Image: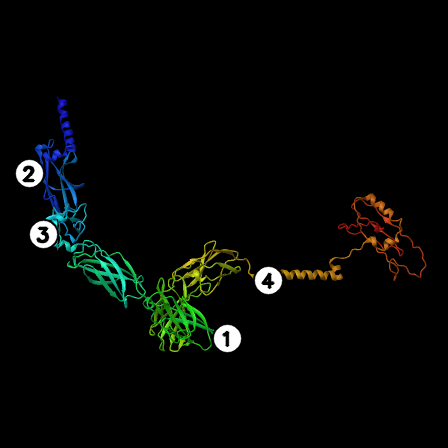
Amino acid sequence: MARRGAGTPFLLQLSLLLLLHLGGECWTLGCASVAVGSPVVPLGSAVTASCTIQRELCRGLEQGKVRISWMLDNKLLAGSQRQGPGGKEVSNLTLPQFNHTQARLWCCVEWNGTKQRVGMAEIRAGYPPAKPLNLSCVLNLGDYGLTCQWEQGTDSHLPTRVVLKCAGSRAQAVTGCTPQGGHSRCTVPRRLLQLYRQMEIWVSATNALGTAESEHLSIDPMDVAKLDPPTLQSIQSIPFQTDCVALAWDVARGTEHMELQCELRYRAPEDPAWALVTGIMGRAGTAQRCGFLFGTQYHFQMRCRRSSASALAAYWSEWSPGRNYTTHEKAPTGKLDAWWGAQPARTGGQLEVQLRWKAPRQREANGRVLGYRVTLSPRRRGRGRGRDAPTICNTTHTQCNFSLPAGIRRVYLSAYNAAGESAPTEVILLERKGQPLAGLRAVPGGERSLWVHWEAPLAPVIAFVLEWQQVTAEPGHCSACWQMERDGAATTALIQDGIEPFQPYNISLYPLYEGTVGVPVHTTAYSQQKAPSHAPKLHLRRISKSEAELCWEPLPVEMQNGFITNYTIFWANSIADVASATVDPSLSSFVIRGLKPSTLYKVHIMASTATGGTNGTSLTLVTTALDDSEIQFLFLTLGLVFVLLMVLLICFQKNERMKEQLWPSVPDPANSSLGKWVPAAVPQEPLQLLAAREPGPAAISTVTVLEGEPGKQPGKEHPALPAVPPALPRPYVRQESPGEPVQYARVGGTGYRGQRLLPEPGPRFYENLRGRG
């Protein structure tokens, strides 16, 4: 029993936990109840709620204090708790501002240290429905259903029911249709409509916070019928009035019984907008219109609506399929704008003329121009004298080159089409020697246009002529790149023909005075600029130990893309010491100074315009160790030294005394005159003695010079004296041990003069031992 009593609270607690987790709805129905002031409230308003816990119905909570708390979705909230009658616990909660469009409010109790949800109320918030706007309806003549559409307005964040209601003049309001799928349109069936009678139609939107209605639309359903477009049957010119046309049209099927109001529109291909003709009334018939250009193709369209319908409620039909018509032609009218260039011919005294003109506008061409004719005298239209005036040019182009005889300065220009020829325009070839204009400048007018400005001239001007040519590497000529300004008081003009961005144009302005043409003034302009396409390629012209001269070729005009404002030269060595210099665009070379000797540098150039710059490829160069002048001085010094040595050598060869001083002559005993005095048998003895002492060399210590008689040269005898054989000298040889000096003497005819012993070192060896005799 003790064990059973101990386990009862545990089982009770376990069962309560299961009920709280799995049977929360039972707690909500039998244990707790949650009440809110309103389940749907305006967004941002206050919300009140109360939670009541019946203690006797909550098993496990009969004893102890019950603590009630709140949760809005997953956010913990605190309310005020009190004890109600019958042992109930009541908690009240007030949310001063509810900013959720939809949320769940939970009532929780604390049990065993955890919060358990025991009751819940769902709250939604939003706005009253917005008023539907711009209600409009159109009747479909196919099934006679009335289709209406509107704008719903802002979202209310609440479920909203939208219906289209309609009411007859004496009938009650009924629901005409309900939009599906969240759309803002629906169709009222024919059975609910009263045709040819006024009906009231409106949109009603309802949700939990209120109802809103659109403006009531009071219409006859037939007034809002959209008709099928009419059909253009034929278009033709009215005889004798070739600028007027007559159009025949027919109504669409099903509208034959209606009185219609129609509109006609037309335009030529070059017209920017349609021309509109209104007030065409009737069921079917014809319409006339005048003021059309001759020889011009027009495109026509037509539409209709019920004439009895209100102008605000009725709908126009779609425009009919288009129909083209070309009016009749007549002879061109007006004068042609002409310009010329003239120069004397090389021979014959004639004048070479290039005549250019502008094609007439469509209003003056009166059709398709077939060609142009230049004559020396005016041509008369019709038959009669002057009809066959000499023609010097007949072309389909807008320029002509021809030669005029000397003294003729007038030609006549006319245009012709299939209907006839225009009146001739007189062209006087005036000389260009008048006063030029001042202050000519050109600025961009757009990507493909240029505004040209100049100062007002002092003398009265009849007109101005502007010429422009694109600047290219290969010279060319645009014959159509000119225009004439007829206003003599103008100081600006817009050039739009043949202008391309990023290309330079030379512009010339000529004033046309009475009886002369002014000297032209010139300027150059771009309609749009950008960075150059490429930078120039650098070349090394010369280099030294501290300077380097660079050069480059100017960029072709096609690659400049604008006016070159400057070149920038950058150079850096291996330790990243970067320097730069700005060079005027008119220059094509630059000298970098202050470089270090025997150093490697990388150099590149940047070409810049007003809108950007472009870098070129890098050039690597190495400075020298010496300048050119230093190298020249070094070579000059070495050359002088070499020349001096050669001169000294030649002098030594030529001067015997100098040669004796530097290279003294040593006597050769073998060739001395003494060798002739010794008998042939005598030299054999010293040779044998020397052979016994070989291989050691013999050192000569003393040479004794024998003197002959005064006045007698050695080796020569006086021819007058008798041939007496002289006394032969006796050789004296003393043998010594190897290395000791050898003393010898020879006795001449005049006696022995003496001998001395020479020092030991420095023995001289002679190859010819026989000559010592």
Residue type pointed to by label 1: Gly
In this view, the residue farthest toward the left is 85
Residue with the mark numbered 4 = 633
Dot placed on the residue nearer the N-terminal end, 2 or 3: 2
Residue with the mark numbered 1 = 348
From the top left corner, tell me how far across and down residue 689 is, in percent. 84, 45
* Observer able to see residue 65: no
From the top left corner, tell me how far across and down residue 3 is, in percent. 14, 22
Tell me the element at label 1.
loop
Q: What's the distance in space between the residues labelled 2 and 1, CA to CA?
A: 134 Å
Residue type pointed to by label 2: Gly
| Residue 66 falls in image quadrant | top left
Tell me the element at label 3.
loop
Q: What's the distance in space between the residues labelled 4 and 2, CA to CA?
A: 124 Å
Residue with the mark numbered 3 = 168
Residue with the mark numbered 2 = 84
Q: What's the distance in space between the residues labelled 3 and 1, CA to CA?
A: 100 Å
Tell me the element at label 4.
helix
Above or below: residue 33 compared with residue 259: above
From the top left corner, tell me how far across and down residue 503 is, in percent. 41, 62
